[in-house]
Image (cartoon, helix red, strand yellow):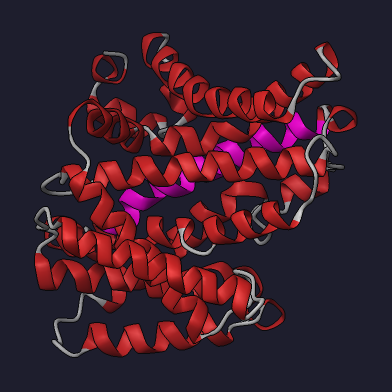
Amino acid sequence: MSGKRFHWIDVAKGMGIMLVVYGHVMRGLVSAGLAPDSSTFQIVDSVIYSFHMPLFFFLAGIFLDQALAKRGVGGVALSKVDSILYPYLVWSLLQGFIEVLLARYTNGATEAGDVLALLWAPRAQFWFLYALFQIFIVSAVLFSFKARWLPYLVLGAAALSFIFARAEDMGPFIHAARMMVFFVLGVVFFRLSKAEIGRAPMVTLVLFSTFAVTEYLFHSFAGLRYSDRSLFSLLIACMGIAATVGVASLVTGRLSSSLAYLGRMSMYIYLGHILVASGMRVALSRAWPECPVWLHVIAGLVAGIALPVVLYRLCKRWQLMFLFEPPRRLAAQGWSRASA
């Protein structure tokens, strides 16, 4: 992250990554037949997916201007090759071939060809990094121009893309086309606020209440799901982002510190959580076939959040950080720093 680090952003990322892990744990349990595919699951799943990934794109967009001022377009592109594209390639291959080897024990039927198609067909959770890299490159070029009206023009075009973009037309750019609006919202938010927000409990209460009401209207009254893209679902995502930001600004004490730590670790959790949470589900279901669903959920959450953090810390200690960063970058930083 370039420039000043804002505590509330780390807290919001911590909240977001917990929702990511929970969503994937529950989907894995339902796919494995260990939890019922009930209407409650479907609604909760849709509520989470309606805003939790847009939240991460929004937070990423906040620091684009600072990165451009510090590095320029070329520097931003190169830094994202290191921090996004490199782990995307490494972990897509790592997770993909582990899934190939263990396919008979898991929910999937992954083949080597699926893994090797990573340049045009991102798999599993890695679609996020694939789209984020594309968005960063395009946005770095667009926002290198200083026209004051440009962000709002791009925001309008990105909103239309969110609503109308179709996979059959956009191909490997579909996720970027749908998520760019939230990244640009982050850019605009920074330009208007410099990412400085105060603690406003009543405002947060209004935002959270409005979010809850709009989610109810969207899912129960209109009978829609997060994949039904429209102006309504765009509003839902924006309300979810605003409510999360408001809550993040209010959290204090030990909870705030814990969430902020998870936020700082969110990339490592995102990269590794599917492997360890799936492994926990398989191991627990084989060791205890009658294991209750609630215990599966808790075990999957703990494994999906804690074990990737442990892996990261071990990689730092054992000088294995090339799993996350290019050796060239590690050499530039100094190997002792990477293993400190």
Number of labels in the image equals 0
Residue at 39% from the left image edge and 55% from the top image edge: 56
**Residue farthest along the right direction in this orientation:** 104
Chain part drawn in magenta: 76-100
Which of the two residues, 47 or 265, is positioned nearer the viewer here?
47
Occupied quadrant, residue 252: top left
Q: Is residue 84 magenta?
A: yes
Q: Position of residue 91 (x, y in %)?
A: 58, 37
Q: Would residue 54 appear left or right of 301 to someone viewing this image? A: left
Residue ID at (24%, 19%)? 337
Measuring from the top left, give residue 71's x and y in whole percent.
18, 56
Q: Is residue 127 above or below residue 177?
A: above
Residue 296 is covered by the magenta coloring: no
**Compared to 58, does 247 lie above or below?**
above
Note whether 164 is above or below 214 in the view shown: below
Residue 137 in view of the camera: no
Magenta: main secondary structure: helix
Q: Is residue 272 left or right of residue 188?
A: right
Q: Nearer the viewer, residue 123 or 264?
A: 264
| Residue 200 seen in the current view | yes
Find residue 171 and report its horizontal and vertical position in percent.
66, 74
In the shown orientation, is residue 296 left or right of residue 87?
Answer: right
Name the residue rendered at 69%, 51% in the picture.
41
The quadrant holding residue 82 is top left
